[in-house]
Image (cartoon, rainbow, N blue to C red):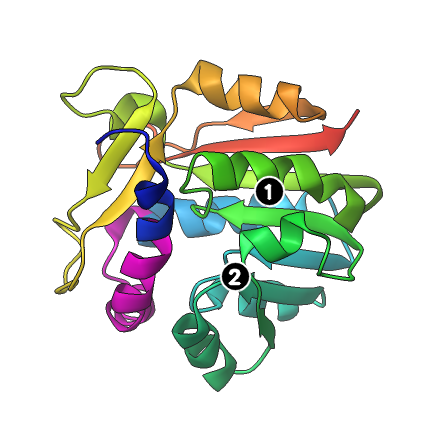
Amino acid sequence: MHNDPSNENGILHSWQQNAEAWTNTVRDGLIESRRLVTDRAIVDAVLDGQPRSVLDLGCGEGWLVRALATRGIQAVGVDAVPALIARASERGGEFQVASYEDIAAGRLPLRVDALVCNFALLGKESAERLVASLPSLLSEDGRFVVQTVHPLVACGEQAYVDGWRQEGWTGFGTAFPSPAPWYFRTLASWVGLFAETGWHLCEMREPLHPETGRPASVIFILQRH
């Protein structure tokens, strides 16, 4: 897929179409890596910083906000897809519709101890603008925690170079109506993105799948310079 603006627009369009399927997939525990590894990994990474307040950016159907709230943390979730926010709100918690463009433009008047993006930095320019804008939302000594697909595993048979890919939803256990574009970054590109936008990489974790022994994801724990 070529680097053109339609890919960025396609992310939101596809997730609007896939909101119901995604919600059902997460709530039914149909993604093995999440069930076995990555859900617990992101919760642990956030809790390690002992935050009192957390903002989940691209919260989807809201499971992480609810998981943190049960541990006494004031958690808020935002997502650009109204259907996902509607489903998230069904089960309780604080949620609101906000796009990454809204956040980058400073339209979210919040300050929290931790920011989280859990498999939610899907675009190229949209992710770059968002990551650069986030320090204003973070309290002093706050942490920014990012979990994403591990590039070495997610690369598959394709070349290990940055570029747009297409998520076909194979192996997700349910029918998704729309393929979804996403921007693949190498490990070096992720590290470079954070450095260029003023973040200090404190720690990088590679949670392993217990059966395959391969990385199920990569987690970056960052603080402001």
Residue 218 position by quadrant:
top left
* Residue 30 highlighted magenta (yes or no): yes
Nearer the observer: mark 2 or 1; the answer is 1
The quarter of the picture where the C terminus appears is top right
Between 5 and 177, the one nearer to me in the picture: 5
Q: Is residue 203 visible?
A: yes
Instruction: Name the spot of residue 132 as percent of width and height, x first.
Output: 66, 35
Q: How far across and how far down the image is residue 109, in percent?
A: 78, 62
For disc 1, the marked residue is 130
Give the amino acid at mark 2: Leu
Residue at 47% over, 50% down = 40
| Amino acid at pointer 1 | Leu
Secondary structure under tag 2 reads helix
Distance from Cα at disc 2 to Cα at disc 1:
20 Å
Q: Which residues are magenta?
A: 11-33
| Rendered residue at 54%/39% (across/down) | 146
Quadrant of the snapshot with the N terminus? top left
Q: Quadrant of residue 6?
A: top left
Above or below for 35 versus 199? below
List the residue tagged with mark 2.
64
Q: Nearer the viewer, residue 161 or 174?
A: 161
Magenta highlight: main SS: helix
Q: Residue at x 27, y 15 (%)?
A: 160
Q: Is residue 192 magenta?
A: no
